[in-house]
Amino acid sequence: MGICISIASSEIHELPENVHGNGHENVQENAILVEESFVSNEAKRLASVYSNQGSKGLNQDAAVLCQGYGMEDRAFCGVFDGHGKNGHIVSKIVRNRLPSLVLSQKNTITKIKSDKKFKNRDGEEPSNEFYKWQEACVSAFKVMDKEVKLQENLDCSSSGTTAVVVIKQGEDLVIANLGDSRAVLGTVSDEGELKAVQLTTDLKPNLPSEAERIRKCNGRVLALKEEPHIQRVWLPNENSPGLAMSRAFGDFVLKNHGIIAIPDISYRRLTSNDQFILLACDGVMDVLSNNQVASIVWKAESEKEAARAVVEAANAAWKKKFPSSKMDDCTAVCLFLQKRQRHRVLSFET
């Protein structure tokens, strides 16, 4: 069973290992929506988180959406897709710790150390606040990886988790990506056409720049004969572990061979046409396109049901496209930036 829960909180802190919703049944701890006490009731209705276990075993995904992330106009969204024997533990450790760790790092930064000019893919230049968040994210991700390694009685040599994080601060988005989960922005054109904008790059070994880094560290990048479309990372002289992503928390057996815990960070300035942010693991994005997930979110019964609608559509797509394969865990986080105006949307932009 999946879970979509809402939890009231007076401050952002480390999330507890076991969280219980307010009146919801079948509560699991994979997907958590944390709401500050000062967040309006209207804003609380504009977010949803949902996770569904696949058919491979334990649900290794974890997700969180913190509304009122230190300040009223901030939000922290995160999806964490675990892998390996202890991936389900690592994803929850990161989910519980990373939001407070990033905020703590941000609050301790008093000046910008880098004098580099940064522009996003559209040429937008961010405010000075972006540089502080950028530094905070890089630092927090590094500390997070060290904390995972120092966990007692937890072998993370070949276990880990991806992380895709979006921090909304007013009209600015800071996007931090580690691995192959994805962030998508749903926006509406002036003509009323819905458009899906991919905010992250799937960080896999098939990317030339990622493969080059791995090979420079003596890691091997190659695909198995039975799955030639999936590039994996292997140790120099062993046919293991075969990691299908190029960045992750954990996976310490490969940390000297090109697998890093440094996120790819980008920036985007929101406009009045931007409608929602969707984060999803590869279990969703392997079977649904960006346009499909955006359409599902937009047509959902309500904003609070949007994440669940995406996951259920992904489950159905798995059964149709790969009937003989084990279905992957599917998780989604959806944050609406404003109340939906679906009557404006005519079709997808082509």
Image (cartoon, helix red, strand yellow):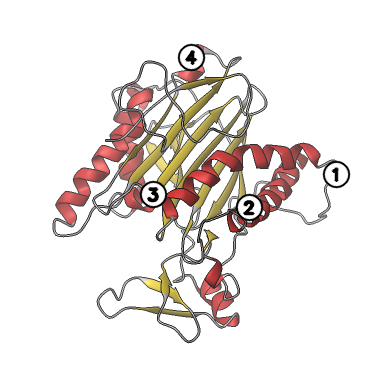
Q: Please name which of the two marks, 4 or 3, marks the residue nearer to the observer.
A: 3
Disc marking residue 111? 1
Q: Quadrant of residue 132?
A: top right
Q: In the image, residue 187 lies at what x, y percent?
A: 45, 36
Q: Quadrant of residue 268?
A: top right
Q: Please name which of the two marks, 3 or 1, marks the residue nearer to the observer.
A: 3
Q: Quadrant of residue 190?
A: top left
Mark 1 to mark 4: distance in Å? 35 Å
In the rendered structure, which disc, 1 or 4, sits on the residue that comes first in sequence? 4
Q: Please name which of the two marks, 3 or 2, marks the residue nearer to the observer.
A: 2
Quarter of the picture holding the N terminus: top left
SS at circle 2: helix
Q: Please name which of the two marks, 1 or 2, marks the residue nearer to the observer.
A: 2
Query: Disc 4 residue type?
Result: Glu
Residue 112, placed above or below residue 248: above
SS at circle 4: helix
Query: Disc 1 residue type?
Result: Lys
